[in-house]
Amino acid sequence: MNSITGRPRLKQLVMLFSTACMILLVTVTTAIAAPAQKKTVDKESPAIQAVPVPVPEAQVELDGKPLFPIKTKVLSLLPEERAKTISIRLLRLVKNPLFHLDSLKVVDNDITSDIVSDDLIIMSVSEADALAEGKPRPQLAREFAGKIRAAMEARNREYSTRSLLFGALYTLLSTLVLIATLSLIRRFFPRLIANIHSWRGSYIRSIRIQSIEVLNEERIVALITSILRSIRLLLLLGLFYLYIPLVLSFFPWTRGMASKLFDYILTPLEKLFHAAVSYLPNIFFLLVILAIAHYTIRLTRFIFSEIEKQTISIPGFFPEWADPSFKITRFLILAFAAVVAFPYLPGSGSPAFRGVSVFLGVLFSLGSTSAVANVVAGVILTYMRAFKLGDRVKIADTMGDVVEKNLLVTRVRTIKNVDITIPNAMVLGSHVVNYSSSSQNYGLILNTTITIGYDAPWRQVHELLISAARATGNILELPAPFVLQTALNDFYVSYEINAYTDKPSVMARTYSELHQNIQDAFNEAGVEIMSPHYSTLRDGNRTTIPDAYLAKDYREPSFRVTRVAGERGGESRATEGKGVRG
């Protein structure tokens, strides 16, 4: 009896001892392996210890509607590939007429939980999926199966005959509402426009400020009419835009298209709203930049206007430089403000904006070489003080008064009232003759040259020329006119009369009057102007002086022949006859 009882106890002791030995062996093995593993990990490179990059999740969809996410991969299949495969299986399954929702179930295995329909495995839920969701694997598989079942039931309801009939009914009602609204718009707007035209002169009148008509009634009526037509067009487009997505949303096949059409308008509006809200700080910054630039320009304008009025005097800075200097300074201020404000402009950081900026810069640099040269020449001419507005100048072959001078061109109006536009680069490269710059302080010397024969006394010629100059209008008494004998030619003497004037703008008229007075003075004195050349037989020819200046008893001289001794001692008889022109 005792031996029988002791055998089970011995067996239990042996089992306990064996268990204790196994536990001790596992503990020792773990203790030995842990330091080695720790040491091995410590020796690993930083690249091996790096945290693995998370894989982006993907959504399982049915008819474009998301059901649940896939967050982990299986073997080499990424979540996106798994989700796409499951979505294709679900779509094929719901299109199968033999499919029943009752066949959808979950089958648990050792390592996966499969969602199946009859013999088709729709998807497998692994331990990694359960770990990513933080739920037990069987529970997660049942949740996924429930979502699939609910989505299929909703799809069956959408594609049912009853749902399609209601969609057709709603489409008919929407079409009737659209037709009624279009008919109302068609009747309302023409009547409203006709009433506006009838209100012209009564309710709608011209806008006047005292005696000045700012906007007449015809333009006001045309403006209101164009606004109403634009509103009608917007209403029509809005109605059709609402009608088409609304009709598409009544049927399951086109419901996704309806949401996309709405998103085409709502998404840009939403983005514009959020962009405007987020852009408010930049707007305030731009306003501050504009305010500073505006008041800086106003201060600069005040300073240069005072310099132009000579209220403020700067040594070496002439008053006529004030206006162009202000324009250059204003341009520099605006350019600096634009550079500062550029990073705060909407879209300034986008590649498209930068590409357009580079393109415009290259286009400007390549196409505006001559324009930039004219601008630089205009600035140089401004500070050269070669001429100013109203001066009588001669630029190359163009002579006239300066009527306009800007950074690009100079406009000259000739004495024939012809406006000639000269690029500033050409002006800078040509010689400029200014007749007005010293006319007020020193007087402009007008000069003309005549040629008189050697038989006329030079003192008399001087007196006649000076008297003719003094008799001419716009010629100054002081300094007095003077004569220069510029050449002693073969047949005549060149006399140059020089006279001062302070009105170069009428120099052409003054020259004409001076020439007239010279002719009168010489004719009255009986001195013939033999220029440039004059050939005649003096004996027997009429003088070149006009009849008005000759004596009343003047007669043309006749030829006279006297007796002279011939070569052989003979004599010739004296004869008289009428003068003959040679």
Image (cartoon, rainbow, N blue to C red):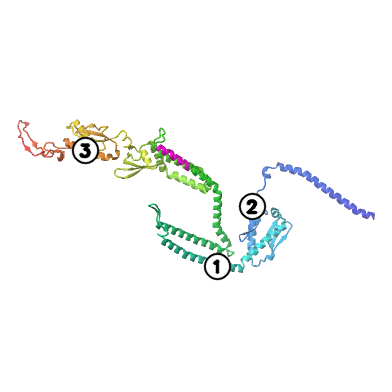
**Residue type (three-letter) at the residue carrying disc 3:** Asn
Residue 173 badge? 1
**What is the spatial separation of the Cα atoms under label 1 and label 2, in whole angstroms?**
45 Å
CB atoms at circles 2 and 3 under 8 Å apart?
A: no
Give the percent coordinates (x, y) of residue 445: 28, 34
In front here: 489 or 16?
A: 489
Give the percent coordinates (x, y) of residue 148: 66, 61
> Relative to residue 465, is residue 574 drawn left or right?
left
According to the picture, the residue beneath numbered tag 2 turns out to be 56
The reply to whether the magenta stretch includes residue 236 is: no
According to the picture, the residue beneath numbered tag 3 turns out to be 517
Mark 2: few/some/many CA within 10 Å (<14, 14-19, 20+): few
Q: Earlier in the sequence, mark 1 or mark 3?
A: 1
Q: Which residues are magenta?
A: 294-308
**Residue type (three-letter) at the residue carrying disc 2:** Pro
Give the percent coordinates (x, y) of residue 523: 17, 37
Image-quadrant location for residue 561 = top left
